[in-house]
Image (cartoon, helix red, strand yellow):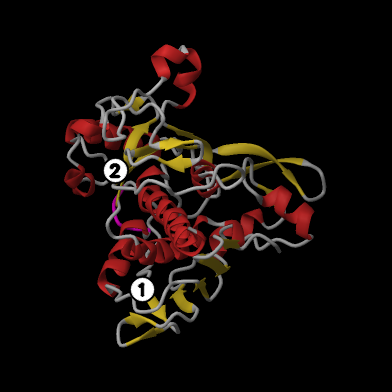
Amino acid sequence: MAGNSFGKIFKLTTFGESHGQAIGGIIDGCPSGLELDLKAIQSELDRRKPGQSKIVTQRKESDSVEFLSGLFEGKTTGTPIGFLIMNTNQNSKDYSHIKDVYRPSHADYTYEKKYGVRDYRGGGRSSARETACRVVAGAIAKQLINSIEIHAFTSSVGDIFLEKPYQSLDFSKTETNAVRCPDPEVANKMIEKIQSIKKDGNTIGGTVTCILKNVPVGLGEPVFDKLHADLGKAMLSINAVKGFEYGSGFCGARMTGKEHNDLFNEDGSTKTNLSGGIQGGISNGMDIYFRVAFKPVATIIQKQETLDKAGNIVEMQGKGRHDPCVVPRAVPIVEAMAALVLADFYLINKIYN
């Protein structure tokens, strides 16, 4: 299986399955001498882990990370950083009913047709549980580029939108509610929506918005390695993501050039920021902002028709412990992937510029 690594210099390779003994990763390219705050890394994992509120999956995992290599006396050594997260609360029997059927809108069918074998227990390698490894690496990347602020938050659930401009939001409120929306009033509406959907045995999608502040000028390359292209790849690699837009996004397609152009100030900043902090694939020093769309979780606790291995249309019903809305737990994953991209370009700049 290809495609288990992300990054060019600051590179993460992950391994493991949802219901295997453990998941883990190897981080290569991290500079030596970086003093790591291990509590901060665990805190990031705690933001992603299951069972943290009533509106997420109730699988109970401590998600405690154990570092196996690459650290000495609290500092990175410059050698590969190996880490492990044990799986301790698998209920594999919850998936026995899908051993011979393909769940709608899951990776079951494509996975088996491509590889000829499928670990049906929780999705195996295609499970979102793999993203815990990304959060570990992203937490280390954050400490490498600690002058850059990364703020992600839930900006919509279904038809409920946080419509305030991000400049007016207090990001310190993001972690004060289960849905991770920095506006308490909108957050309550989102939580009510998710609870209602969950009661019906259904799921719902939403969006995560991410703001990157204090990004220096010059990250990114002008041709194939554009900063926004790598951010897009990073976000689209997250389970359940269906769309990515930065700056003016698709709204910019309705504007004229006169309306859309960001005019300069004398210091090189711009009066507006419809470019989203990136021009010609290179950061310009303004805030980078983007939005990521997540589909409804494919497993619903309602009866549906599906296909079995014999080619028959059969009836199935979802079982097990699943998120009615993946968005709240996706917030730290979006931040982690953004940090990995920025750390990679930061090191590329140090080497080649």
The residue under the point 72% across, 49% down is 110
Residue 291, can we see it? Answer: no
Q: How many marks?
A: 2
- Residue at the image position 36 percent from the left and 48 percent from the top: 331
Q: Residues within 10 Å of mark 1 (few under 14, many from 20)?
A: some
Tell me, for residue 64, which label it has, or none. 1
- The amino acid type of the residue labelled 1 equals Ser
Where is residue 269, by image quadrant? top left
Compared with 214, 18 (above or below) is: below
Q: Is residue 126 magenta?
A: no
Residue carrying label 2? 179
Drawn side of residue 207 relative to residue 227, left or right: left
Q: Position of residue 126 (x, y in %)?
A: 60, 56
Neighbor class of circle 2 (other Cα within 10 Å; few <14, some 14-19, many 20+) is: many
Q: Which residues are magenta?
A: 50-54
Image: 66 above or below 98:
below
Q: Residue at x 26, y 28 (%)?
A: 165
Q: Which of the two labelled residues, at mark 2 and mark 1, occupies the earlier sequence position?
A: 1
Q: Position of residue 275 (x, y in %)?
A: 41, 30
- Give the percent coordinates (x, y) of residue 136: 40, 66
* Element on which disc 1 rests: loop
Residue type pointed to by label 2: Val
